[in-house]
Image (cartoon, rainbow, N blue to C red):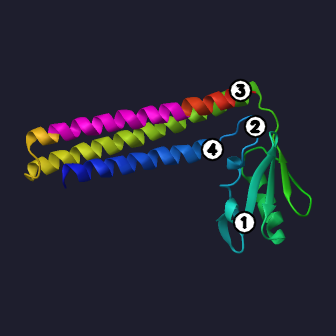
Amino acid sequence: MSADDILMDAEERMDKSVDHLKSSLAGIRTGRANPGLVDSLRVEAYGSTVPMKQLASVGAPEPTQIVVRPYDPGTLKDIEKAILASGLGLTPQNDGKLIRINIPPLSTEVRKKLVARIKELSEEAKISIRNVRRESNKAADQAEKDKELSEDDRDKLKEDIQELTKTYESKVDEMAKAREKDVMED
């Protein structure tokens, strides 16, 4: 594997770790209504489990309310069940055409738990990024053994991989800080 291939592979995999963190953070509740809270919920409908966003449009017309409009009114009950079973502590109100979800304000205790969860998620992302770094460094060592890279090229590649790791870890920190700020605000 060439140095460029190893570096590109590392970057792609680190990107995936950051994307995964981004989607995980979107599911964390803040005091404001956010469609990301429910649009990725899995709903048991049509004999299989489907993401909510394939069954309904999800919006937040007000800062304290989420509205779910199913494309097929026959899935209303299934969507309602999925929201209740999600463990988010949200109570859907079904009016026969759409579901309204009022977002209650968060208590200080709940906010602290959410911040702790954000820290866990960001640490998992950093571990994933570091694992990519370790595997990429091994690939660089192997490429040098296989005479595909000189010793200097391998060392330069490892420096580049370390820079990439620092960049992605700082992205993770920024995302986590921003989400913590959202959770702690009223």
How packed mark 4 is, by other alpha carbons closer than 10 Å (few <14, some 14-19, many 20 or more), is some
Is residue 116 something that shows in the picture?
no
Q: Could you say where residue 151 lies in the image, as x and y percent from the top left? A: 9, 40
Residue 52 vs 21, above or below: the answer is below
The amino acid pointed to by label 3 is: Glu
Residue at (59% x, 31% y) in the render: 178
The amino acid pointed to by label 1 is: Leu
How packed mark 1 is, by other alpha carbons closer than 10 Å (few <14, some 14-19, many 20 or more), is many
Q: Quick one: label 4 or label 2, which is nearer the N terminus? A: 4
Disc 3: which residue: 185
Q: Quick one: label 4 or label 3, which is nearer the N terminus? A: 4
Disc 4: which residue: 26
Residue 113 vs 101, above or below: the answer is above
Checking the image for residue 32, the label placed there is: 2
Disc 1: which residue: 55
Q: Quick one: label 1 or label 3, which is nearer the N terminus? A: 1
| Distance between the alpha carbons at the discs numbered 4 and 2 | 12 Å
Residue at (42% x, 34% y) in the render: 169
How packed mark 3 is, by other alpha carbons closer than 10 Å (few <14, some 14-19, many 20 or more), is few
| Distance between the alpha carbons at the discs numbered 2 and 1 | 23 Å
Q: Could you say where residue 164 lies in the image, as x and y percent from the top left? A: 33, 38
* Side (left or right) of 22 relative to 132: right
Tell me the SS state at disc 1: helix
Q: Quick one: label 2 or label 3, which is nearer the N terminus? A: 2
Range of magenta residues? 155-175
The amino acid pointed to by label 4 is: Ala
Tell me the SS state at disc 4: helix
